[in-house]
Image (tube, rainbow, N blue to C red):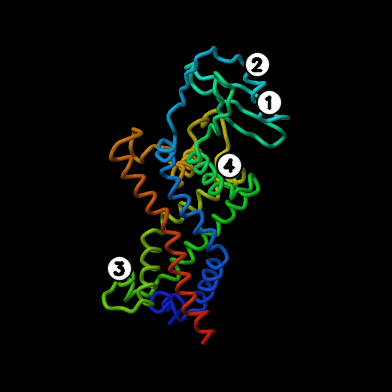
Amino acid sequence: MTFWQRWIRQPQTTWLRKVIFQVHLWSGIGVGLYVLLVSVTGSVLVWRNELAAAATRDPIILTGSGSRLTDEQLKEAATRAYPGYSISINRAPDPDQAVDISLERGTDRKTRLFDPYTGRDLGNSVPIGLWAIRKLLDLHDDLLAGRSGRKVNGFGALLLVVLSFTGIVIWWPGIKTWRRSLRFHKKVGWRRFTWELHSMIGFWSLGFIAMFGISGAYLGNPEPVQDLADWLEPVTQANAGLRIVDSVVYWLAFLHFGRIGGIGIPCSVRSGLCDWATKSVWALLGLAPAAMFVTGAVMWWNRVIRTKAR
């Protein structure tokens, strides 16, 4: 048989599949924990608007027997509590609402609530739930490392694309048995079950995982992608605002899990069954890379680590 015939009928016997399998294996080992991290955090952040609404507390309204403090008096109270900080006062429309005061000293920034009558420090103005959501977003976008972390995130997303396409090559079992790899089979051992689960999730979620990886690579390093778009379709007066590449770049950012921004797809409103259904699908599919890592790690442990231990 020719190489192509062997690939169609018995791909397991070809040297190319063996090479691609090694690329897939070691790429998965190298970025597996990273994939698990961004997968889980991304699925949670699909619901970040709803989580933020649940974490937002009601305004603190206070009443006092005396007169309310002036801005200068509030600054003096804040300075006594936090010496050395520059102070900015943000009063709410309701004069009885706790006053939000921002304090900065170098790179340290605080936002505190103060009693408008007594100048007493009432605590952090940002609820712990909103703080946690913000940190989770920083972890997902920047790996808690600012711009450098975002660049690393973009490179990791490219490795996810590599895993996706090498995985679909490995998935191909041959022309006679390919349909069997699309579903589970009864009465199989746990090792076979893990393999079938890994293969089935990889096949049915390939498009979404590849999209997550490509869009993540763009969001991590947008400049090279934008430069490529400008090279493919240079900006002219005739195509300003109408370029196909601009639409592609827009949808790359819009479709990325965790970045729906409260708008369901293809919904035209910000609430309702369509919005919730779309977000649920996005959150579920966002966990597919995590499931691939877990099942892949189980197979690697069983085939490699346990075998060597024996």
Please provide percent x and percent y for residue 186: 26, 75
Q: CA distance from mark 1 to mark 4?
A: 47 Å
Q: CA distance from mark 3 to mark 4?
A: 40 Å
Mark whose residue sits in front, 3 or 4: 3
Q: Secondary structure at mark 2?
A: helix
Question: Is 293 on the left or on the right of 282, as rendered?
Answer: right
Q: CA distance from mark 2 to mark 3?
A: 70 Å
* Residue that protrudes farthest toward the front in the picture: 65
* Residue depicted at x 55% and y 66%: 27
Q: Secondary structure at mark 1?
A: helix
Task: Please name the residue that numbered disc 1 is placed on.
Answer: 79
**Is tag 2's residue or tag 4's residue first in the polypeptide sequence?**
2
Q: Which mark is residue 183?
A: 3
**Is tag 2's residue or tag 1's residue first in the polypeptide sequence?**
2
| Amino acid at circle 4 | Gln
Quadrant of the rendered image containing residue 138: top right
Q: CA distance from mark 2 to mark 1?
A: 10 Å
| Amino acid at circle 1 | Thr
| Amino acid at circle 3 | Arg
**Is tag 3's residue or tag 1's residue first in the polypeptide sequence?**
1
Mark whose residue sits in front, 1 or 4: 1
Task: Please name the residue that numbered disc 4 is placed on.
Answer: 226
